[in-house]
Image: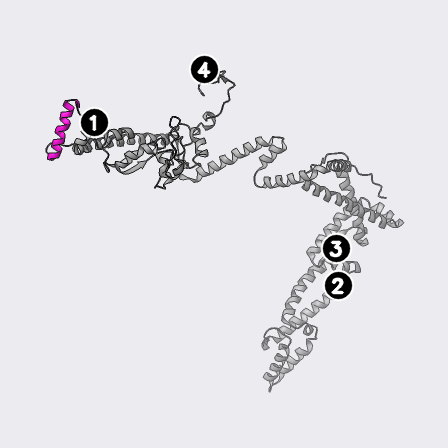
């Protein structure tokens, strides 16, 4: 109908849609505007009218806020005549003016001043004249403009309508001849219906494309020569892979959330085909690094940490610790030397010193250590306030007497049977039993089976430490572990046996030098060699 070539590209479709819009606009543009050769001249009269109308509307609103609407339609000459007659009276002038003021007050929303009545009447008269002029101007407007001004009630709205008409006329002008022919042949309505259908179809395509793009994150080829064909091919591809669309939509939803919270690199890695395990490793490493940097930044101690300063503090601590140990040794030496017994202390001390000197001079001939210890009880504790002995030595050299020592300390108590510890415990006032219940108990391989089945409740446990723990004696645990040069040496035991209760010191080369299992393909030669054949022959530095 419009003698236009069929569109192919996206731009051509949009152009033809604009042409269709112009055809539709031809129906909405009044005929007198479509046929005019000067649009500005046609709009001059209604523009002037609306400008005056806006000014008058503001004045009208002001008058209506002060006076009754019906009063503003009345003739003011009668009230002016009443005012003039009241002023001419010699007697009763004030009463007449007051009556007129009261009459006007009934129509006013403000207080009437008698002296300003002529001003009020003059203003209202001018307002009525201006209202008549606006009514006459409106009556002179053509019917078409009256219909247009029902929607364009302000000068600004009329200017917008004018620009729209001018723009549409520019488009319509390209097909003015075709439109006249269609209008003359009566086919304009049919053409307008088809134009509406075309614009609606194209709008549907654009909206559907936008929805599909947002939902599936599609990328359309806008440079394709055939606009609709490219869309149809993509739609066919979507239908062929409909089973996977749900998973893709779910992925895109989660990917959008990830991008919003700053995880764009993770989404890009997945979409680039990077394996999930590698992505997780890199992601967790980034998270841990960020957490570490955040903690270091917010913690003044860590933020101000430097290796040089830390090493300097370590050196200072070592120096002070060594000085403290030396001073402690000197203090102990001083205290011990100043409490050594002398012959002037007492008769008993002098006697015991003579016995000790005689034994030393004779190299202990005819005198056992136990007998010597029993003969010098006062001198012995002052010369040797602390004794290091095994349970067997204590039973052999010390008499069986209670409270010989203030305190008895057992080390490695998990390796000491209870029966061997009882004798030593009886010789002290207090006891400190140190050991690890998770260590292997002392072997009983060579001991006979002497368990009393009838009195299991009073049978000893594996060690003195186990018996003390079973009795619920007061206990304290050491949490700091400092013996292992590498944290991995104690990590397994800490996790499996100590419930991660020990505080260990991390190693700087934990991943490179940690303890690991290396399985060697070999066997034990039970022959003369008695060696493991084909043992590990790797890096000796790691071994």
Q: Mark 2 or mark 4, which is nearer the start of the sequence?
A: 2
Q: Residue at x 80, y 54 (%)?
A: 30
Which of labels 3 and 4 is toward the front? Answer: 4
Q: Label 3 crowding class (10 Å Cα cut-off): few <14, some 14-19, many 20+?
A: some
Q: Mark 3 or mark 2, which is nearer the start of the sequence?
A: 3
* Residue contact at pointers 2 and 3, CB within 8 angstroms: no
Query: Where's residue 536, x and y in %?
Result: 48, 18
Q: CA distance from mark 3 to mark 4?
A: 118 Å
496 drawn magenta:
no
Q: Mark 4 or mark 1, which is nearer the start of the sequence?
A: 1
Q: Image quarter for residue 494?
A: top left
Q: Residue at x 60, y 41 (%)?
A: 257
User: Which label number is shown at residue 246?
Assistant: none
What residue sits right under mark 4 in the picture?
A: 530
What residue sits right under mark 1 in the picture?
A: 369
**In the picture provided, is 192 more to the left or to the right than 237?**
right
Q: Residue furthest right?
A: 185
Q: Which residues are magenta?
A: 346-366
Q: CA distance from mark 2 to mark 3?
A: 14 Å
Q: CA distance from mark 3 to mark 1?
A: 136 Å
Element at label 4: loop
Which of labels 4 and 2 is toward the front? Answer: 4
User: Which label number is shown at residue 43?
Assistant: 3
What residue sits right under mark 2 in the picture?
A: 138
In this rendered view, identify the residue nearer to me: 44 or 360: 360
């Amino acid at each position: 109908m419009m003698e236009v070539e069929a569109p192919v590209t996206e731009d051509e479709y949009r152009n033809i849609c604009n042409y269709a819009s112009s055809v539709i606009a031809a129906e909405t543009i009044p005929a007198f505007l479509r046929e005019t050769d000067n649009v500005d001249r046609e709009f001059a009269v209604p523009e002037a009218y609306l400008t005056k109308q806006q000014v008058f509307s503001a004045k009208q609103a002001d008058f209506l806020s002060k006076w009754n609407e019906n009063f503003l339609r009345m003739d003011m000459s009668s009230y002016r005549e009443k005012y003039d007659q009241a002023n001419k009276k010699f007697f009763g002038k004030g009463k007449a003016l007051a009556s007129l003021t009261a009459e006007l007050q009934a129509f006013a929303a403000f207080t009437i001043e008698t002296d300003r009545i002529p001003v009020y009447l003059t203003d209202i008269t001018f307002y009525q004249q201006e209202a008549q002029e606006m009514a006459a101007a409106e009556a002179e407007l053509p019917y078409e403009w009256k219909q247009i001004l029902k929607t364009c009630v302000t000068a600004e709205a009329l200017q917008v309508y004018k620009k729209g008409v001018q723009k549409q006329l520019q488009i319509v002008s390209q097909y003015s001849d075709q439109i006249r022919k269609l209008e003359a042949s009566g086919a304009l309505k049919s053409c307008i219906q088809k134009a509406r259908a075309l614009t609606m179809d194209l709008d549907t395509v654009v909206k559907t494309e936008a929805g599909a793009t947002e939902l599936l994150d599609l990328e359309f080829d806008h440079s394709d020569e055939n606009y609709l064909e490219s869309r149809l091919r993509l739609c066919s591809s979507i239908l062929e892979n409909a089973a996977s669309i749900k998973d893709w939509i779910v992925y895109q939803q989660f990917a959008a959330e990830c991008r919003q919270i700053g995880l764009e690199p993770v989404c890009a890695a997945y979409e680039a085909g990077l394996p999930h395990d590698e992505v997780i490793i890199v992601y967790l490493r980034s998270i841990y690094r960020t957490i570490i940097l955040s903690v270091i930044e917010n913690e003044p101690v860590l933020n101000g940490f430097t290796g040089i300063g830390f090493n300097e503090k370590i050196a200072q601590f070592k120096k002070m610790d060594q000085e403290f140990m030396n001073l402690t040794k000197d203090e102990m030496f001083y205290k011990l030397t100043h409490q050594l017994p002398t012959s002037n202390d007492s008769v008993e001390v002098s006697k015991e010193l003579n016995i000790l000197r005689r034994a030393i001079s004779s190299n202990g001939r005819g005198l056992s250590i136990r007998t010597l210890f029993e003969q010098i009880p006062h001198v012995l504790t002052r010369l040797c306030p602390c004794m290091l002995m095994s349970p067997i030595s204590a039973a052999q050299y010390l008499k069986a007497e209670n409270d010989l020592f203030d305190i008895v300390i057992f080390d490695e108590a998990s390796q000491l049977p209870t029966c061997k510890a009882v004798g030593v415990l009886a010789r002290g006032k207090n006891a400190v039993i140190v050991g690890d219940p998770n260590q292997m108990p002392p072997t009983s391989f060579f001991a006979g089976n002497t368990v009393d089945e009838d009195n299991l409740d009073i049978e000893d446990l594996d060690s003195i430490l186990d018996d003390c723990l079973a009795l619920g004696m007061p206990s304290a645990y050491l949490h700091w572990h400092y013996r292992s040069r590498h944290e991995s040496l104690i990590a397994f035991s800490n996790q499996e046996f100590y419930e991660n209760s020990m505080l260990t010191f991390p190693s700087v080369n934990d991943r490179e030098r940690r303890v690991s299992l290396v399985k060697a393909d070999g066997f034990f030669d039970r022959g003369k060699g008695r060696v493991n054949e084909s043992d590990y022959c790797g890096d000796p530095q790691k071994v």
